[in-house]
Image: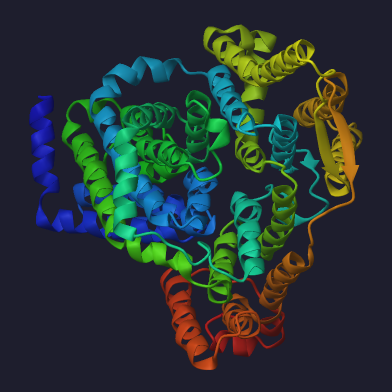
Amino acid sequence: MVWEAAIGALGVISDPLRLMFVVLGTFLGLIIGVIPGIGGLVGLALLLPFTFSMDPYTALAFLVGVQSVTTTSDTIPAVLFGVPGTVGSAATVLDGHPMARKGEASRAFGAAFTASVCGGLFGAFMLAISIPILRPFILSVGTPELLAICLLGLTLVVSLSRGAMAKGLVMAAVGLLLSTIGDEPQTGEMRWSFDLDYLWDGLPLVPLALGLFAVPEIIDLGVSRGSISGGKVKDERWQQMKGVRDVFENWWLVLRCSSIGTLLGSIPGVGASVIDWIAYGYASRSIKNSAETFGKGDVRGVIASESSNNAKEGGALVPTLAFGVPGSASMALLLGAFLIHGIAPGPNMLDKDLDVTFTLIWTVAIANILGAGACFLFAGQFARIATIRSGILVPLVFGIMLVGAYQGARDYGDLVVLVLAGALGWVMKGYGWPRPPLILAFVLGGLIENYLFISHFRYGLEWAARPVPLVIISIMIFVLIRPLFQSWRSKRRMASNGAQGADAAPKKIQQTLSVSDVFLWFAAAALFIYVIVSSNDWEAPARLMPQSLAAVGLVTIGGYFLWNLVSGSFVKFTLQDSTWAGSIRQGLWLVALVLAVRLIGMLPAMGLFVVAYMRIEGKTDWPRIIAIAAPFWLAALFLFHNLLHLPWPASFIGNWLPALRSALGRLL
């Protein structure tokens, strides 16, 4: 029966008309993935109304085609600009962008696209065979298990902060605190909203992520006045094939990370923003000598992230199809499409509607092959973007980034958050404070607080003693304690070697802190103290997590300095800081762009900004400016205004001259 359904579904999806819609959906999904801030969720929401007149097979194949490949093409901006196309490619930035800066963008693309198609096919295969097997497992997963999984993912990312684990813990606590801003769901307490309507629902993820990761990279690119790759790009085709070979040489890593993506994707509530970090953290812990290479352009980091985030699409379909429980926000929209077309997810999907299930499985497989093939075809051209000088590239990326950030809450406040997060991200990057723990903690914050409240309400402290949470918590403790033990053992070995030598006692290791770095430590401590004091009058459920996090943060800061004193490391302070002039100049360009949006509207400000930056910073001649800026602005007008119908923020000129705003189609 199963094989008959699989063969019959292949015949259904092979219909030329349906296959054409799969190709169309794949093509649109690739475009959506390339544009930062849009993502598969927005893409599905925009395209869902167009499926109402289609038959169920065609409609679902079209939507699954869109969703399956957004995490393939989102690699392109992640590698070239350090800008995650979607949250699913955030971990790819850590090694993909350094590879581009070394002239190995094509190799990163080759590895990423191959790992993506392998992960996607693995997820589709596991979906085909695992629904009956995983049914008891999924039904047994409760909030304690989900809470433990979220904490494990966060711990793995903190452990990536080699040599700066205390900073990683502090940033994780800050990220979790940022996630608590806004309305507290249990008590209705408004936490740190400062009477701003914008903060009632909390900070949006997209502008915060773009600010932390993308803005610092683009600022540094502007300061360099060169290109991403420094003008060097190795032979594209050879580099692509080298990336493909890297994947096959690391097939065991691909298999393990694809398994992680499929398994976690099948658990409702564990989304794309978590899975790639968990896989990346696992890879960094399991690969020998990864401390010297991960985060500096190691292709294995790209492979781990990309294989897991594509495999999760097949996994996320498991609870959606079998139980009618969406495995992610995107799957919730797909579930709505099921119901619109008269298909009821549940046990029938494994029985009389098995042909529909296999239609989706075949679509996931076909879309991944088509998407990877298309990306391979144009990867060489994309890699050449890394050779474009910053005077031309920076304003274009800033413009796209601005529109992407605006997708957070579609409010002018998104742009303010982008600027503030960009300043924070630049400071953190400059002084060695890890950014991944902050953003992952922010993503997981709402889930962790919700799961913690339910688990504590239902089980008390006994939730941690359940078998699965107990095992996971033990792993977390081992991951956090192991570096301290290794450091202590290393110092013992050095002391032993020094005692046996002819010279005197061994030299003590000195750790140098700049004044700015010390200021950041004290700023973090002041933030935690403020959290404790300002939340004292809140009800217990509202202040439980913030005050617990603040206490953990203060203990971590105290422990960091105490450990350095006890272990014999002296802290040496220096006034030497890197020059800020060039970076401040680039940052002011972004601030000017955001202010111009408020004055004359987003698209007019974007066009004016591109022209001004190219002329002043890029020293570009007028014919070239017109040849680049005009098509760019017209493409943005068509895509964002005419096709996607984005509601632009109101400008001062538009408010002063409403007739002009109406005449220009509400661009102002």
Percent position of residue 314, x then y: 32, 35
Of 448 and 253, nearer the camera is 253
Occupied quadrant, residue 12: top left
Occupied quadrant, residue 529: top right
Relative placement, left or right, of 153 versus 176 is: left
Of 353 and 447, nearer the camera is 447
Q: Quadrant of the N terminus?
A: top left
Relative placement, left or right, of 593 versus 84 is: right
Occupied quadrant, residue 483: top right
Of 652 and 214, nearer the camera is 214
Q: Residue drawn 67% across and 23% down? A: 453
Q: Is residue 601 above or below residue 504?
A: below
Q: Residue furthest toward the bottom?
A: 623
Q: Residue drawn 60% across and 40% down? A: 443
Q: Residue drawn 90% across and 50% down? A: 575
Q: In this orientation, does residue 70 appear?
A: no
Q: Is residue 473 above or below residue 83?
A: above
Of 444 and 573, nearer the camera is 573
Percent position of residue 181, x then y: 74, 43
Relative placement, left or right, of 241 versus 40 is: left
Colour logic? rainbow
Q: Residue furthest toward the front?
A: 502
